[in-house]
Image (cartoon, helix red, strand yellow):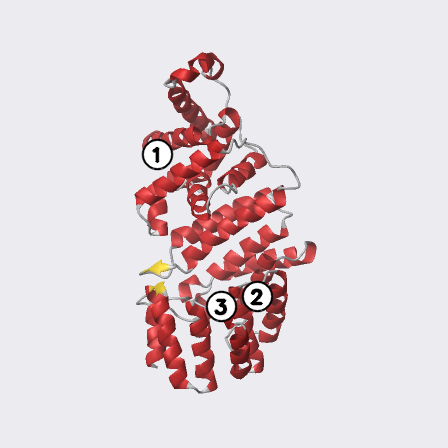
Amino acid sequence: MTEVETVLRELAPRVLAVLVKRYGQFDQCEDAVQEALLAAALQWPTEGVPANPTGWLVTVAGRRWTEQWRSDQARRRREAAFSREETPEVSGDDDELTLFLLCCHPALSVASQVALTLRAVGGLTTAEIARALLVPESTVGQRISRAKQQIRNAGTRFELPPPDQLPARVAAVRQVLYLIFNEGYTASSGPALHRVQLTAEAIRLTRQLHARRPGDGETAGLLALMLLTDARRAARTGPDGALVPLEEQDRTRWDAEAIAEGTALIEDALGTTEVGPFQLQAAIAAVHDEATSAAGTDWPQILVLYDLLVTVAPGPMATLGRIVALSMVDGPVAGLRALTDAEDALKGHHRLHAVRAHLLDRAGDHEAARAEYEVAARRTLSAPEQRYLWDRSRR
């Protein structure tokens, strides 16, 4: 990505926040900002980045909006009020937080929230989002168009929700960012294990959210979790793209700088804020990252953290993680018993069969393990995971 592209991506949400605050009409403002970004991408590489790039973009986008508005005959009587030149105001922290909340409006589906967040706050084009999500560009375009129409139909104003509603709305933003990160870190389908563009955007946007709510422990926990997890990315695949499990990874390839930053974030959050699920997941990741070898992993501490996690935020992945930790502390037979007890809650997911296969293999029942690895391989849509699971079954 060029320097100009980086600047434009960082400024896009700020400029959109200014326009929506000034004019309303999210859909028309977003179109106007996209045109301003295109104009900048064409002019700035040759003419140079202006001294006030935010003001330049706001001015150009404002003119584009005015041109669009003038074409609407029903609004012609309001032309004089909106067509005058104004000094572009700079969006504050509350404006950019409001933009996050607008993109994750409860009236939208999760798929629409993800697409709109990547477009409006992340500054990605429709084509870039389509490539990142491995869906047709027309599908992304339809999702974004429907999302903007739903926001308009809901009559949403560009303002922060009441204080009593803000924590729940910010929690929805965190969940969308976490979904974006997870899809990038372990793609649910397709030939590659990672979609680096998605993980990078998720981390960048979470940094923005954390900067606007530095006292929010769960936002700090989410950022720490992303950094501590993504730090292992270089070691997760071999030269041929095959998946390398955690215990077999070359830990010298882990990103020490990201681990240090993530560890500092989670230590501060755990010491100063109320504990939440993202913080607990980040703490688990930190324990893994601090171990210099698989054998040196502090599994008893990880088990304690998973016990807390399944209490605070019960879910299938937390349950599976706890069972793996239990098996590392008390042995594979204990893990298999716990897996049987939890089978109803985990039914249908390929990772249930993958974990069972791993535990059966450790317990010495290799034939049963082979059969479970094959079931898991058939149930995942990720090509790297399939190759890994078929390879384990052959072993």
Q: Who comes first in sequence, dot 2 or dot 1? A: 1
Amino acid found under the numbered disc labelled 2: Ile
Query: Do the residues under discs 1 and 3 have CB atoms within 8 angstroms?
Result: no
Residue tagged 2 = 284
Check disc 3 and report its element: helix, strand or loop.
Answer: helix
Check disc 1 and report its element: helix, strand or loop.
Answer: helix
Q: Does residue 391 appear in the picture of this structure?
A: yes
Q: Please state which of the two labelled residues, at mark 2 or mark 1, is closer to the viewer.
A: 2
Check disc 2 and report its element: helix, strand or loop.
Answer: helix
Residue tagged 3 = 346
Query: For the residues marked 2 and 3, what is the alpha-carbon distance in whole angstroms?
Result: 21 Å
Which image quadrant: the N terminus?
top left
Q: Please state which of the two labelled residues, at mark 2 or mark 3, is closer to the viewer.
A: 3
Q: Who comes first in sequence, dot 1 or dot 3? A: 1
Q: Who comes first in sequence, dot 2 or dot 3? A: 2
- On the image, the x and y values in percent for residue 317 come to 51, 65
Relative to 11, say whether 306 is above or below: below
Relative to 316, say whether 358 is above or below: below
The residue at the point 41 percent across, 16 percent down is 74
- On the image, the x and y values in percent for residue 99 come to 51, 37
The residue at the point 47 percent across, 50 percent down is 202
Residue tagged 1 = 41
Quarter of the figure with residue 144: top left
Query: Do the residues under discs 2 and 1 have CB atoms within 8 angstroms?
Result: no
Q: Please state which of the two labelled residues, at mark 1 or mark 3, is closer to the viewer.
A: 3
